[in-house]
Image: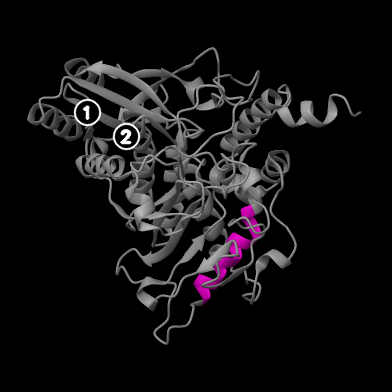
Amino acid sequence: MSSESGVAAVKRFIEEHHIEEVECLVPDMAGIARGKILPAQKFLRGMTENGLRIPESVFIQTVTGDYPDSDGVTDPGSSDVYLRPDPGTIRVVPWYDEPTAQIIADAYYLDDETPVEIASRQVLSRVLRLYDARGWRPVVAPELEFYLVEVNTDPDYPLLPPIGRSGRRETSRQAYGVDAVNEFDPLFEEVYDFCEAQGIDIDTLTHEAGAAQMEMNFNHGDPLELADQTFLFKRTVREAAHRHKVYATFMAKPMADEPGSSMHIHQSVVDAKTGKNLFGKKDNSNSDLFLSYIAGLQRYLPAVMALLAPNVNSYRRLRPGADAPINTHWSHDNRTVGLRVPVSTPAARRIENRVAGADANPYLAIAASLACGYLGMTEELEPTRPIEGSAYRLAHTLPRTLYDAVSKMTGSRPIKDVLGEDFVTVVSAVRAEELDAYQRVISSWEREHLLLNV
């Protein structure tokens, strides 16, 4: 779509929906929505006059709102970049009283030609271009877990499950419990309504293993579109929860004695011309390309853990027996492994990456997973044999801390080549700043056990 026709399409959308304000959004490294809110007519002028500008430093902002002292990539002396809204992402924001639209933008430097390669949406686009050059088209379907918790305004206090319509708090685990989900039926009715209004293609709602832990599945589709939908979905669920006087959290491990929350990513690769799934053979066996894709995930997932498990809290989830993987073994229909092949026909053959946490930026989690598979296919790697039984009896080979994850990422030349060396440099700088901020905090555990005993 040309710039002119894109502006015309956005203008028509604004007129048809009587839009008064527009939220122009960009996801930062943590997946937080940054950007600008403008009157509709001013937004349209900004699209035609390159008037939508934002500091490049947005893309190196930490989750605490700070910035690395020096990342070696961004230029503080020339900090503005242009926002170029993607017309295909414009949607009505359904929870405002006045007609408001939201649109996701890509960022470009002031020459108006060079994309900001460290922006998370651009990182995913970069990986997709590599697939396109090979005549491959990846297909993904995320599954996103989250908790509903009671409003908590003091971070020193542990989180609690909220009280449902029965007037009682859920205290036992109700995996796949239908009535347990219905405790919060008004909230989820609003989530479905909001998603339908935004064209967010969610599928199944289930109760997960934790108290008031839920999972929403997305229908499979184009990775960039699904990343956009997941980005907006997290914002939507949090908003719906606020309206019902509870919190929705996508923290990887929000409660000590409950399972963590993941973002499982189902992925397959089809022929770009024919649409044929390249992972399954007519005799229902796995193709060599599929096995190489799995091998790529096995080899390179440890090097992208800083994207799949991006926060210090993320590693609390990855423990034996905690409904989360600890290694990159693979198997058929086995939920203890990091890489699960669901029972499927050749046309639906796929691998489920179970490593990513719900706290991950969806653009970067999908890009990282696809990058690993791409390297496996292009390097013609061979996987280990699929395991039998529990993967928890085998060695813990995924990084155990964010320190280890960043070290592995910065040491991987193939990952730098696929994701971009500047991007990897920026990830390292941002994570180092976040780790430094975390190290300055003294936990209640330290006060409880060390204060008078050591």
Q: Position of residue 424 (x, y in %)?
A: 61, 38
Locate residue 246 relative to residue 421 in the image: left or right. left
Magenta region, residue range: 288-301
Q: Locate the N terminus and report the quarter of the image it occupies.
A: top left
What's the coloring here? one colour
- The residue drawn where x is 33% and y is 36% is 236
Q: Can you identify the residue that label 2 sits on?
A: 240
Q: Locate the C terminus and report the quarter of the image it occupies.
A: top right
Mark 2 residue type: Ala
Q: Can residue 174 be seen in this view?
A: yes
- Toward the right, the furthest residue is 454
Of helix, strand and loop, which one carries label 2?
helix
Q: Can you identify the residue that label 1 sits on?
A: 101
Tell me the chief SS of the magenta region.
helix
- The residue drawn where x is 39% and y is 45% is 227
Mark 1 residue type: Ala
Locate residue 30 relative to residue 231 in the image: left or right. right
Compared with 429, 198 (above or below) is below
